[in-house]
Image (cartoon, rainbow, N blue to C red):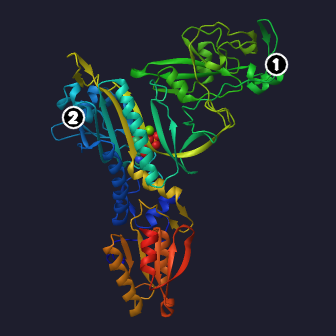
């Protein structure tokens, strides 16, 4: 394509709201254009080209894995979401509206209900299963804080796939196949990524995995082990059980006067005891459906911190919120002196797994200025859950080596759904014995437009974008330095035609511009390779440029066609 004919409105100006490299360069490079500054974007020709390339890689690998592409209506009847119970639950991210006949609709933020509806109408027998259907379509989420350009838009392009099975085992087979397929997709796109265990709410286990593109700018904290493959979202991370070298305090059970010991630190100093032997008790108000609430005390070792998502899942709540000291007082609880052993009526207790069989523990007495010493949890039956936030330096549960935190961009998410949607929506099939059963489902997402941002977060320098081989809008850019020089133009045109006929996608910079702005645009746009046809052509030379590191090689004009073919194709 000819630069002179393309709409590539590059600019030197950084948008006010942009802090991330991907946001800045995608706008400055004329790939995308903000619409009204609220998480809505137009894709300009170059942006659309990259989006299509990424989309093609996603589609190619999914089709190879036996998935089938469909395209579902973006506008979704609210009735389907009422059937699943999500219409009320989903919150403000769901854009609801009415048509002229006063019927309720939504703009799909995800399409489980729609796909189940599609399948329940046409699939009746186990003989038609398994099925994996996907689409690459728009989604709308009225995000509270749309930001970072394509990273968190309100309207965005998602690949969403849904699989349907006659058994749990078959769904798990497909889940593993999708994990492999996603790995191929992200590898082809040239991304450095980790597959991590994700929070899967009530399902637990390895029922949910996220594909994290590693980048310092990522919004998610992930825990990784460098000695093995283990990686997990902070909300799902587990560790090898911690031991403590210090001895536990020997004491018989007693109530102890402990004034001014409201923090773990103060208490540890007071008793000269390692926080490992103190019980940290955190009070939260758990919110449930229909306005129901419950006060819960989460107790764990003083050396550990509470992971709130784990805590929320432990009580199956929709959310956890803080409680004021006044509210605590009304219930008979005292901030700084709370404990899980003797609690006022109406208050629930959840204990961390690390307290199971713990001995010599000190905890709050639920009375001002008092703690209980000599507590034992040996043989104590209680509601135990994993509540711990894994810290850097904690040991890996797989290999025992030390783990660390890193940042990631969630680019994909695969999830074992089970019958969560097929049951309420009545998506049943007849099994081999003629018995009706709900279909077992998996769901698989990729943030296709977010991937553009993720690729640039991982591949850029202080001058602009650096596209990877399979994502780049062009394989090569030919820059004619001086458009008035007939010899330069002739070589540029010849090379352009020859490479096009070899199947290369080439951008010919034939603009009547000075060389300076042309090279600046090249650096900003980030095509992996360029040929610069400049003054040295008089001596028979051109320059071959590699965008990574902006490395330049002088190449004889006679051999440039071969060099490009060899290095770029
Ligand atoms: P996040 O935690 O980032 O909000 P999510 O867990 O809500 O994402 P999913 O429902 O799993 O997202 O959606 C599948 C994929 O869609 C995500 O893995 C992500 O790549 C992408 N995605 C989600 N929300 C957005 C958004 N607002 N803008 C762009 N891409 C998004
Ligand atoms: Mg997700």
Q: Eyeballing the image, is 498 above or below 468?
A: below
- Local crowd at mark 1 within 10 Å, few (<14), some, or many (≥20)? few
Q: Position of residue 450 (x, y in %)?
A: 43, 51
Of the four image quadrants, the one with ligand 2 is top left
Where is 70 relative to 542, above or below? above
Location of residue 373 in the rendering, given as x and y in whole percent from the top left corner? 76, 11
Question: Residue 472: which disc?
Answer: none
The span from disc 1 to disc 2 (Cα, nearest Å) is: 62 Å
Mark number displayed over residue 118: 2
Of mark 1 and mark 2, the one earlier in the sequence is 2
Q: Secondary structure at mark 1?
A: loop
Q: Nearer the viewer, residue 241 or 233?
A: 241
Label 2: how many Cα within 10 Å (few below 14, some 14–19, many 20+): few
- Pick the quarter of the image with the C terminus: bottom left
Say the numbered circle drawn on residue 247.
1
Left or right of residue 374: residue 47: left
- Mark 2: which secondary structure? helix
Q: Is residue 394 visible?
A: yes
| 176 or 404, nearer to the observer | 176
Query: Looking at the image, which residue is at 43% across and 52% down?
Result: 451
Instruction: Say if mark 1 contacts mark 2, CB within 8 Å.
Output: no
């Amino acid at each position: 394509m000819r630069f002179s004919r393309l709409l590539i409105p590059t600019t030197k100006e950084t948008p006010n709201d942009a802090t991330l490299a991907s946001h800045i360069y995608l706008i400055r490079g004329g790939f995308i254009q903000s619409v009204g500054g609220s998480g809505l974007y137009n894709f300009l020709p170059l942006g659309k080209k990259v989006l299509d390339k990424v989309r093609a890689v996603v589609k190619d690998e999914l089709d190879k894995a036996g998935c089938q592409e469909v395209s579902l209506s973006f506008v979704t009847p609210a009735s389907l979401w009422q059937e699943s119970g999500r219409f009320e639950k989903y919150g403000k991210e769901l854009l609801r509206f009415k048509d002229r006949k006063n019927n309720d609709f939504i703009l799909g933020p995800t399409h489980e209900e729609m796909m189940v509806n599609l399948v329940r109408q046409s699939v009746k027998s186990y003989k038609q299963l398994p099925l994996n259907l996907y689409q690459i379509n728009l989604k709308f989420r009225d995000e509270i804080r749309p930001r970072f350009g394509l990273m968190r838009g309100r309207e965005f392009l998602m690949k969403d796939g849904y699989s349907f099975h006659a058994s749990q085992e078959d769904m798990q087979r497909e889940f593993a196949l999708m994990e492999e397929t996603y790995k191929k997709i992200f590898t082809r796109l040239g991304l450095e990524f980790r597959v991590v265990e994700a929070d899967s709410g009530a399902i637990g286990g390895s029922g949910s995995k996220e594909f994290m593109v590693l980048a310092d700018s990522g919004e998610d904290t992930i825990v990784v082990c460098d000695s093995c493959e283990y990686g997990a979202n902070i909300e799902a991370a587990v560790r090898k059980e911690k031991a403590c070298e210090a001895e536990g305090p020997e004491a018989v059970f007693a109530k102890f006067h402990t004034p001014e010991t409201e923090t773990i630190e103060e208490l540890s100093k007071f008793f000269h005891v390692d926080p490992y032997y103190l019980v940290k008790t955190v009070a939260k108000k758990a919110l449930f459906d229909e306005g129901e609430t419950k006060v819960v005390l989460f107790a764990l070792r003083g050396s550990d911190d509470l992971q709130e998502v784990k805590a929320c899942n432990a009580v199956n709540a929709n959310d956890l919120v803080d409680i004021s000291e006044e509210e605590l007082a009304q219930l008979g609880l005292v901030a700084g002196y709370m404990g899980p052993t003797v609690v006022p009526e109406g208050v629930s207790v959840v204990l961390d797994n690390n307290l199971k069989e713990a001995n010599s523990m000190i905890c709050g007495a639920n009375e001002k200025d008092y703690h209980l010493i000599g507590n034992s949890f040996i043989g104590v039956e209680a509601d135990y859950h994993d509540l711990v936030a894994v810290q850097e330096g904690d040991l890996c549960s797989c290999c025992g080596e030390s783990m660390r935190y890193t940042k990631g961009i969630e680019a994909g998410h695969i999830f074992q759904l089970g019958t969560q949607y097929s049951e309420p929506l009545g998506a049943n099939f007849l099994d081999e014995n003629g018995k009706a059963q709900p279909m077992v489902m998996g769901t698989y997402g990729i943030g296709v437009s977010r991937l553009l941002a993720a690729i640039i977060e991982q591949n850029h320098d202080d001058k602009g974008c650096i596209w990877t081989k399979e994502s780049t809008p062009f394989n090569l850019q030919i820059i004619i330095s001086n458009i008035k020089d007939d010899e330069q133009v002739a070589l540029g045109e010849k090379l352009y035609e020859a490479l096009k006929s070899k199947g290369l996608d080439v951008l010919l910079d034939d603009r009547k511009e000075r060389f300076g702005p042309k090279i600046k645009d090249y650096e900003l746009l980030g095509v992996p390779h360029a040929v610069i046809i400049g003054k040295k052509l008089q001596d028979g030379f051109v320059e071959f440029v590699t965008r990574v590191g902006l490395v330049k090689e002088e190449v004889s004009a006679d051999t440039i066609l071969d060099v490009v073919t060899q290095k770029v194709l």
